[in-house]
Amino acid sequence: MLNNYFPIFLFIIVSILIGAMPIVASRFLNKGENSKAKNSAYECGFENFNDARMKFDIRFYLVAILFIIFDLEIAFLFPWAVSLENLGVNGLIAMSIFLFILIIGFIYEWKKGALDWD
């Protein structure tokens, strides 16, 4: 009866080995040296910090929220565009209202200065 479970056991062992190989290889290949390039600011706009409670500019949050808003807008636009013939005028009106609300939010953030980087 245990012979029926051998493929499952083999699958688990192989999965563990495949998952552990990159971790073990990185331990052997990593020299652990820090360079100036590794510790420099990269895409985030501020220097590395050691304290997780460090204060930084709220504009990072505002730009991230703006990105999420427009990313979700695109996620809703694709299925709407594909099924526009089936939705008819009601679908067009509903999407127009949705886009109008998003445009109002974008104008609000723009007027508040969230997109100004002084």
Image (spheres, rainbow, N blue to C red):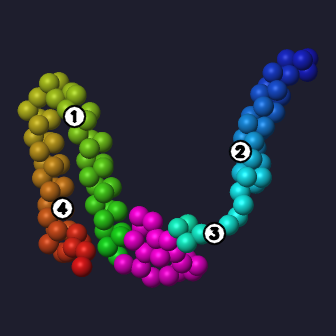
Q: Quadrant of residue 88?
A: top left
Q: Nearer the viewer, residue 89 or 32?
A: 32
Instruction: Name the disc covering residue 80, or none.
Output: 1
Q: Nearer the viewer, mark 3 or mark 4?
A: 3
- Residue assigned mark 3: 34
Q: Residue at x 50, y 71 (%)?
A: 40
- Return the disc, 2 or 1, that comes first in the chain's sequence: 2
Q: Find out whether the residues at labels 2 and 3 contact each other: C-beta distance under 8 Å.
A: no
Q: Residue at x 77, y 28 (%)?
A: 11
Q: Nearer the viewer, residue 47 or 30?
A: 30
Q: Residue at x 26, y 44 (%)?
A: 74
Q: Amino acid at mark 1?
A: Trp
Q: CA distance from mark 3 to mark 4?
A: 41 Å
- Return the disc, 2 or 3, that comes first in the chain's sequence: 2
Q: Which quarter shows the C terminus?
A: bottom left
Q: Find out whether the residues at labels 2 and 4 contact each other: C-beta distance under 8 Å.
A: no
- Residue assigned mark 2: 22
Q: Which residues are magenta?
A: 40-57
Q: CA distance from mark 1 to mark 3?
A: 49 Å
Instruction: Name the disc covering residue 106, or none.
Output: 4
Residue 31, position in %: x, y?
Answer: 72, 61
Secondary structure of the residue carrying numbered label 2: helix
Q: Nearer the viewer, mark 2 or mark 3?
A: 3
